[in-house]
Amino acid sequence: MAKRTAAPNREILEAALQGLETQRQKLDEQIAQVRAMLGPRVGRPAKRAGGQSGGAEKGVGGGKRRNLSPEARKRIAAAQKKRWADFRKSQA
């Protein structure tokens, strides 16, 4: 990661944030127009007020979550630790 020499100016960050929010608002309007053109979508839950679809809390696919055995969790944790160790070794 590149090192920064000075902190960004607050006014610049606020202007950038305002511009990004304007872009997001325009994109949201365009997305709403396209969705309106598509009409009702069969088999998809309606969006909630919070912006999350019905199955978002349950993970990908919205189905039941799989239960992992303790052995499987240990294998996954060991593999992840190995990946991080290899990553840190390559950074040194």
Image (spheres, rainbow, N blue to C red):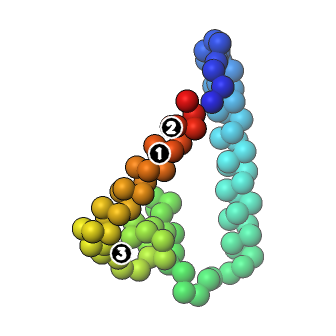
Q: Quadrant of the C terminus?
A: top right
Where does label 1 land, which residue? 84
Q: Is residue 32 visible?
A: yes
Where does label 2 land, which residue? 88
Percent coordinates x, y for residue 12 in the rendering? 69, 21
Spatial CA span between label 1 and label 2? 6 Å
Amino acid type at image mark 1: Trp
Residue located at (35% from left, 76% from top): 66
Nearer the N terminus, badge 1 or badge 3?
3
Q: Residues within 10 Å of mark 1 (few under 14, many from 20)?
A: few
Asked if the residues shown at circle 1 and circle 3 are in contact, with their CB atoms under 8 angstroms apart, the answer is: no
Spatial CA span between label 2 and label 3? 32 Å
Asked if the residues shown at circle 1 and circle 2 are in contact, with their CB atoms under 8 angstroms apart, the answer is: yes
Percent coordinates x, y for residue 83 in the rendering? 48, 50
Quarter holding residue 74? bottom left
Spatial CA span between label 1 and label 3? 26 Å
- Secondary structure category for the residue under label 1: helix
Amino acid type at image mark 2: Arg
Q: Is residue 54 visible?
A: no
58 relative to 25, above or below: below
Where does label 3 land, which residue? 65
- Secondary structure category for the residue under label 2: helix
Amino acid type at image mark 3: Arg
